Amino acid sequence: MTIKQIYTGCIAHAAYYLESNGEAAIFDPLREVQPYIDRASTDHAKIKYVFETHFHADFVSGHLDLAKKTGATIVYGPTAKPGFDAHVATDGEVFTIGKATVKAIHTPGHTMESTCYLLIDESGKEHGIITGDTLFIGDVGRPDLAQHVIADLTEDKLAGHLFDSLRNKIMPLSDDLIVYPNHGAGSACGKMMSKETTDTLGNQKRTNYALDPKLTKEEFKKAVLTGLTPPPGYFPKNVLMNIKGYESLDTVMERGKRALNVNDFEVVANEEQALVLDTRPAGAFARGFIPNSVNIGLDSNFAMWVGELVPDIKQTILLVTVPGKEEESIIRLSRVGYDNTIGYLDGGFAAWKAAGKEVDTVGRITAAEFAERYPAEPLVFDVRKKSEFESEHVEGAINVPLNAISQHLAEFPKDKPFILHCAGGYRSMIAASILKQRGWENFVDVENGFSGIRQTSVPRTAYVCPTTML
């Protein structure tokens, strides 16, 4: 039996490939399924099953395309009600893949259909458990997401189910099992996940706060629910796409991979009221961009920030990318359900500039220049997360987390200059592009952000976070 974790860091997602004796199974696949098909082909294996641990909120799964292209059966856990052909497993049901077996273990809590899959090798030894969002390394799945889709599924009810699932279904299992979770650090599906993406169950029993056997159910609920931040707005929309179905990625790609010359790009942008999304790195964007475009760079958590900041998942999008990055941009948008890319600027920003079209820029200063100007220009906006800000920040800075910027635009003045920064310059450039789009011109961004500022003599204030569960 071969088990391989396929980790995609930009969305902190882990899919799994299992192969035995010419048959294969894929667990929680991403939207683009060809890599799984290619791997199975290399192993001369037929993909027999597509196992889903639950209806995902943070990405659109590739289960439908994968099943259509391979003939595999989609499997969900008990209580699931998918809007397409799938096998709904019973608790304890066993599936064969070659000479290996997979046992479904119903573990409601993160969602009601949440199911873990126990992996048993050819010799009958229990090797590992694919835990989805039930159990992470260092954390457990947040139980407050399902209520955004079904109001009766309150976080208190789900936290109680999660306690029972962990205590009665997971913790009695062997300590030497390998835990294979669906996410690692950076995912919004938990609050304090480890950067490690696998561990033994025994070590998790010793170190994971949620598996502390001394916790009562009420203590567990409090520990799990304390410190949860609001989930990204696209989460409920992704859940519904995963439940009801969606367009094939092939169709999405065909629509999006339309090269537009400068004039056609401008016409389509105006006629379709499309969002012009510039996926180039922050530095390149700052030096010149199409007015009213928004910068979310591919070089970091691109899909997550699109989901946080573009409220309409059906928004039509036109892309400006580094030439050659058009297809990657479309795929990464589709991972979180933004399927309405309708073209890209042929030749990228260089073509726009060469055509003599209007260009805008964002002023940037170095950390050393920031030190020279501070505190003479004391108005500083820090767009990092609240927890980052509370850990350490520039004295007098105002914290407006990037994911909440649209709700706090009134806090940014238009009648006096201010300075913008984040941790390293990625998020602050997104904020800068949004402010520019809304009419602000009176600010500069700090290149390299707080990481650069920390190395200067600028006064900083350190705080101990009020809770370790932010």
Image (spheres, helix red, strand yellow):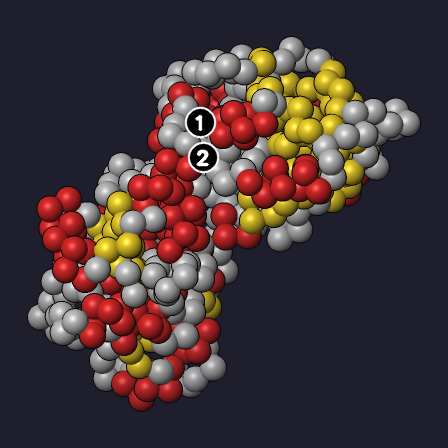
Residue flagged by tag 2: what amino acid is it? Answer: Val
Image spot of residue 422 (x, y percent): 37, 66
Q: Give the residue drawn at x 38%, y 48%.
A: 330
Q: Give the residue drawn at x 40%, y 16%.
A: 152
| Above or below, 68 relative to 431 | above
Which residue, given by chain and number where applicable, does mark 1 sit on?
242
The foreground one among 79 and 122 is 122
Residue flagged by tag 1: what amino acid is it? Answer: Asn
Q: Give the residue drawn at x 45%, y 59%.
A: 300
| Above or below, 383 relative to 67 | below
Image spot of residue 241 (x, y percent): 39, 27
Image spot of residue 213 (x, y percent): 72, 31
Tell me the tag on residue 415.
none
- Res. 332 in view: yes
Image spot of residue 269 (x, y percent): 16, 51
Which residue, given by chain and number where applicable, does mark 2 sit on?
60
